[in-house]
Image: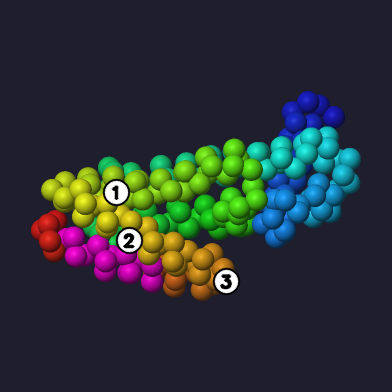
């Protein structure tokens, strides 16, 4: 087998193993997870797993890096101050969809990185990135409403983020055929809330 094909097969195996690890970590917690359980979930032997990862910490570290990379990309797409002057429903839609997509593509990651038993060196950077959402929302709102007082801006961004978080679990767990209805409800809830700023600032 030539080298490019071997590398591609190895990359697919790593993705398979990490996907299995995400499931096991989310179901049992990091502390109780074992490499044997991860191997079973992936449908491979423990020996195959050890060809790619030395232990479960190495797998959690790889998952953390993958999740951070995908979250960063989603944030950059969702929270672009250059889109701040779009009509409010379109702006809200552009903010929420990348964030919904990254959570749909990474089932179990939120449970894993929000758990208390993952080593802090692995969970802290991801938590910081998740917590940065409010700041990113604030930047977009500041571009749209430049005269808004800082305290009002901070409060509005925090409440908007909480509205999103409150409905995210429902959206992710809802069957795909019904998901768009909940995304529409989320959009309308956020637009309704942010409309008060439109009225107060004359935007």
Q: Answer few, some or many: residues within 10 Å of disc 1's Cα (few below 14, many 20 plus, some between 14 and 19).
A: many
Q: CA distance from mark 1 to mark 2?
A: 11 Å
Q: Residue at x 85, y 29 (%)?
A: 1
Q: Position of residue 120 (x, y in %)?
A: 59, 42
Nearer to us of marks 3 and 2 is 2
189 is within the stretch colored magenta:
yes
Along the viewing direction, whichever of 119 and 125 lies nearer the viewer: 119
| Main secondary-structure element of the magenta-colored stretch | helix
What is the x, y in percent for residue 57?
Answer: 71, 40
For image coordinates 45% across by 67% down, the residue present is 167
- Disc on the earlier residue, 1 or 2: 1
Residue 42 in view in this figure: no
Q: Residues within 10 Å of mark 2 (few under 14, many from 20)?
A: some
Q: Which of the two residues, 186 or 25, is positioned nearer the viewer here?
A: 25
Query: Is label 2 in a helix, a strand or a loop?
Result: helix
Of residues 27 and 67, the one nearer the viewer is: 27
Query: In the displayed structure, does residue 153 sit left or right of residue 106?
Result: left
Mark 1, secondary structure of its residue: helix
Q: Which residue is mark 1?
A: 138
Q: Residue at x 79, y 31 (%)?
A: 6
Residue behind mark 3: 175
Give the residue pinned by disc 2.
159
Q: Residues within 10 Å of mark 3 (few under 14, many from 20)?
A: few
Specify which label sits upstream in the sequence, 3 or 1.
1
**Residue 193 vertical position relative to residue 95 in the rendered view, above or below:** below
- Residue 18 in view here: yes
* Region rendered in magenta: 185-198
Position of 195 relative to 30 (above/below): below
**CB under 8 Å between discs 1 and 2:** no
- Using the numbered discs, state the Cα–Cα distance from disc 3 to disc 2 in whole angstroms: 27 Å
């Amino acid at each position: 087998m030539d080298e490019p094909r071997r590398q591609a097969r190895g990359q697919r195996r790593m993705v398979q193993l990490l996907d299995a690890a995400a499931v096991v970590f989310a179901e049992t917690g990091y502390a109780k997870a074992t490499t044997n359980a991860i191997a079973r979930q992936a449908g491979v032997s423990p020996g195959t797993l050890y060809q790619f990862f030395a232990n479960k910490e190495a797998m959690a570290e790889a998952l953390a890096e993958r999740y951070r990379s995908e979250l960063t990309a989603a944030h950059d797409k969702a929270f672009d101050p250059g889109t701040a002057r779009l009509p409010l429903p379109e702006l809200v839609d552009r903010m929420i969809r990348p964030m919904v997509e990254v959570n749909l593509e990474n089932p179990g990651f939120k449970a894993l990185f929000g758990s208390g038993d993952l080593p802090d060196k692995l969970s802290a950077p991801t938590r910081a990135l998740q917590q940065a959402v409010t700041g990113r929302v604030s930047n977009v709102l500041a571009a749209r409403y430049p005269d808004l007082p800082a305290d009002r801006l901070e409060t509005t961004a925090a409440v908007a983020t909480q509205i999103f978080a409150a409905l995210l679990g429902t959206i992710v767990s809802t069957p795909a055929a019904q998901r768009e209805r909940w995304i529409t409800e989320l959009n309308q809830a956020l637009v309704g809330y942010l409309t008060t700023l439109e009225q107060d600032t004359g935007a």
